[in-house]
Amino acid sequence: MSEIKRKIEDHGVIGDLRTCALVANDGAIDYFCWPDLDSPSVFSALLDGDDAGLFAIQPNWPEARRQQLYLPDTNILQTRWLDRSGVAEITDYMPLCNREDTQPRLIRRVKVVHGEATFTLRCAPVHDYARAETRATVDQHGVTFCAENHPALRLSGKVDFAAEGNAATATFTLGAGEHREFVLGCADDEKVDEEKTALCFQETLRFWRDWSAQSTYRGRWQEMVTRSALTLKLLTSWKHGSIAAAATFGLPEELGGERNWDYRASWLRDASFSMYALMRLGYVDEARHFTHWVGRCVENSHHDVEKLQVMYRLDSGTELHESELLNLSGYANSTPVRIGNDAWSQKQLDIYGELMDAVYLANKYGEAISHRGWQHVCKMIDYVGENWNQPDAGIWEMRGEPEHFLHSRLMCWVALDRAIRLGQKRSLSFPYERWLRVRDEIREDIWTNFWNEEKGHFVATRHGDFVDASMLLMPLVRFVGATDADWLATLDIIKDQLVNDGLVKRYNRAETPADGLEGTEGAFVACSFWYVECLARAGRVYEAHFEFEKLLSYANPLGLYAEEFDHQGFALGNTPQALSHLALISAAFFLNRKLNGDDPLWQP
């Protein structure tokens, strides 16, 4: 396995509500999809090597200490070098794409705080996931990067550029207080001009600070909760209202392994988690826009419940065909590097519960459901009532044979439960007796077929022996009491079999034949935060508090989380991961109430 030049946790993320870029702590932007988050990448060095595309700027201080930080309450990132010769910094940000006519621009402001430094710059995009032949051309307006059948890029800045194949290079020296600005964007965008950035920084700074100030969270860990909220906002499409699962594709769940997926899509499963977190923090508009996006997904599935998918494109499109990028060697030689995601065509019955929970929350805290919307709900619930007792791929999107998973069964129960609650709350017409009967049948099935009497705990599959971490949602969705003795016995088994010093694996592969893939994976970040919340709800508040603090220490220096942890708590998988930050917000919110002693006896 080759040496990893820039680790996953060595990156910050910037964005403009249309796309995102990863900025490493050595001053290199080594991952950037353009012009949209799910467009082909133009910088792919993170998934191969520097020849796959990057934009690097750094001072000639090889022994300097490097650090990164966000300007407070913003997504404006600074990378800093501290050396005997002085202090230098790069401020990276993207002006907001919050109008139809705006195009993505990446702005890099290089400054020497004190001392003097000579910088080297290399901007070398390679279009189409590093598959296209890209050429750089220097003119009076800067450098243009062109590839056949792909939109051209342009770089501007007040330095003497030189072109070398697909790369623009420059060397320049700055003294104390001096700076240079570089703008990368669409070749025909007149705003790609360093002289037109005077207001960009202040406008971007004001947007992020105003947005952060809307949060109603005032508890412990406010800085981490705010960073999680800002990360979720970065993954949100201003145009569509969708929330991407992560900013990246292809980053491995196991170094050198094959579990490398594309997460630049939006999962219906995340709907209820997103609604819950955004509503709790006071971001009603984002929650409403996400609800509207979900509605468009349903429409694009032709209102046919059987065609409802687990995930959709960010524009609510339905097809996400999976393919492999054979030209990329992968992060840490982890192949294949995949784009698209074939899980879109799987049967995952749990999505109906998560979708219905989101509809219920939207009605509780936002807009009342329409007549037509309720008709769609009724059709969906009738479908669940007829199909809940079927095997499926489950929440973890198993690629082996379908099984009867407890989590899928649990969320079918949630679908019926929330629909009944909503119908009663809004005095809507629905077949009360039939839905109530099906809900009770599902509950009875879970207690009969997913409770192992011999072992004395719930199990992950019908008549099985083992547990998986999705079972941690049982008390969180109010199927079982958080202090119920049977649940506490299950929680202890999960701790014994899946938890290692607070890091929670999704399942043990040897016990899960439906997994269907070679190799293993790390601990799942979201599951680790679910575990903390379960401990707090069970009354084990001190233990929950300590485990939560440990999880916070595993964030990267910027407070960001990828999808998984390795055995040392370092990042694995795509980053930053929406579900990880959603779970953090939920755990922080509930644990803070517990620690304050103001939590009511009834726990939602």
Image (spheres, grey):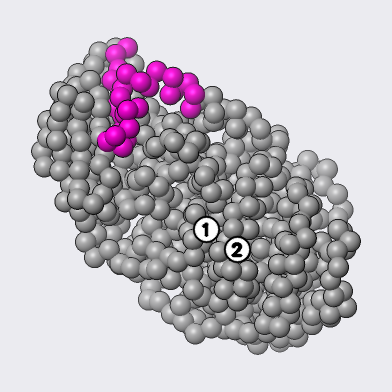
Q: Which mark is residue 299?
A: 2
Say what amino acid the circle numbered 1 marks. Answer: Ser
Q: Pick whichever, 581 or 202, lies toward us.
A: 202
For the residues bearing labels 2 and 1, Cβ distance under 8 angstroms:
yes
Q: Secondary structure at mark 2?
A: helix
Q: Secondary structure at mark 1?
A: loop
* Residue at mark 1: 316
Indicate the position of residue 532 as horizontal and vertical percent values.
65, 55
Measure the C-alpha gap from mark 2 to mark 1. Answer: 9 Å
**Residue at image coords 14%, 35%:** 137
Indicate the position of residue 398 as horizontal and vertical percent values.
49, 76
User: Does residue 187 show up magenta in the picture?
Assistant: yes
Indicate the position of residue 485 as horizontal and vertical percent values.
79, 70
- In this view of the protein, can residue 547 be seen by the observer? no
- In this view of the protein, can residue 234 be seen by the observer? yes
369 relative to 106, above or below: below
In the figure, is residue 256 to the left or right of 590? left
In the figure, is residue 101 to the left or right of 357? left
The image quadrant of residue 463 is bottom right
Q: Which mark is residue 104?
A: none
The image quadrant of residue 129 is bottom left
Indicate the position of residue 59 as horizontal and vertical percent values.
23, 27
